[in-house]
Image (tube, helix red, strand yellow):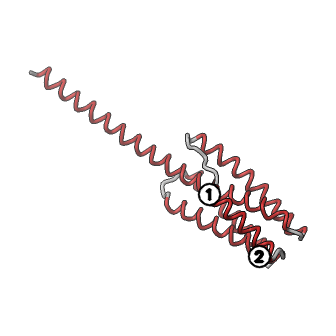
Amino acid sequence: LYNKIMHITMFFQRLYYANLQILLLKGMINMQNQETKLLSSLYKNASMGTSSINTILSKVKNPKLKGELIAQLKNYSTEATSLKKMITEKNGEPRDINLLTKTYADAGIMVSTMMNSTPSHIAEMMIQGTNMGVIEITKALNADKEVDPQLKQHAEDMLQKEQLYINKLKTYL
C-alpha cells in the first residue's frame, strides 16, 4: 500500500512539474510573441519608410531635401535589414508590407506629387507618413509592457530618430 501511495504521489508530482513547465513555456512563447509583434511593427515601419522614400525621391528637386531623404532612406534600409534578421532569429517570419497598402501609398504619393512637388509639400507628406510610423511604434510599445528591455530601447531609439526626421523636415514647410 505504501509503495502504491508513493507511486501515485510521484505521478502527481511529475504531472504538477510537467504542467508547471508547460505554463512556463507558454509564458516564454507569449513573451516571444510579444517581442515578435513589436519587431514586426518596427520592421513594417522601416520597410514603409524605405518604400515611400524610394517612390518620392525622383520627384524631389531641392538638393538639401533630397540629401535629407537619402540619409533617411539609408537608415530605414539598414534598420529593415537588421530587424528582419532579429525576427528570423526569434523564429518569426518577417512580413513585408501588404501589397495593397504599398500600392495605395505609392499611388497616393505619385498623384499628390503630380499636383504639387514643392519641397514644402513633399516635406509635409513625409512628416505625415513619419507621424503614422510614430503612432504605430508607440501603440506596439504600449501593447507590450513586458518586452525585453533591449528591444524596448531599440524601439524607443527608433522613435527618437523618427522625431528627429520630423524636426528636420519641418524646416522645409
| Residue 87 x/y as whole percent | 60, 45
* Relative horizontal placement of residue 94, taking residue 117 as reference (left or right): left
Q: Nearer the viewer, residue 80 or 108?
A: 108
**SS class of the residue under badge 1?**
helix
Q: Residue at x 60, y 40 (%)?
A: 89
Q: Name the foreground residue: 143 vs 58.
A: 58
Q: CA distance from mark 1 to mark 2?
A: 23 Å
| Residue 113 drawn at (x, y percent) | 79, 72
| The C terminus sits in image quarter | bottom right
For residue 72, the mark is: none
Q: Check the image and name the residue furthest to the bottom.
A: 173
Identify which amino acid the numbered label 2 is placed on: Lys
Query: In the visual, does 4 lie left or right of 96?
Result: left
On screen, residue 132 above or below 14: below
Q: Residue at x 58, y 55 (%)?
A: 152
The residue that appears at 59% across and 67% down in the rendered structure is: 135
Q: Which residue in the structure is indicated by mark 2?
A: 170
Q: Tell me if residue 88 comes above or below residue 71 in the rendering.
A: above
Residues at discs 1 and 2 in contact (Cβ within 8 Å): no
Q: Say which of marks 1 and 2 sits in front.
A: 2
The N terminus: image quadrant? top left
Q: Earlier in the sequence, mark 1 or mark 2?
A: 1
Secondary structure type for disc 2: helix
Residue 155 tag number: 1
- Side of 35 where 46 appears, left or right: right
Above or below: residue 46 compared with residue 61: above
**Farthest left residue?**
1
Inspect the image, locate mark 1, and give the three-letter code of the amino acid beneath it: Ala
Measured as percent of width and height from the top left, residue 18 is found at 32, 34
Instruction: State the image quarter where residue 117 is shown.
Output: bottom right
Label 2 environment density (alpha carbons within 10 Å; few <14, some 14–19, many ≥20)? some
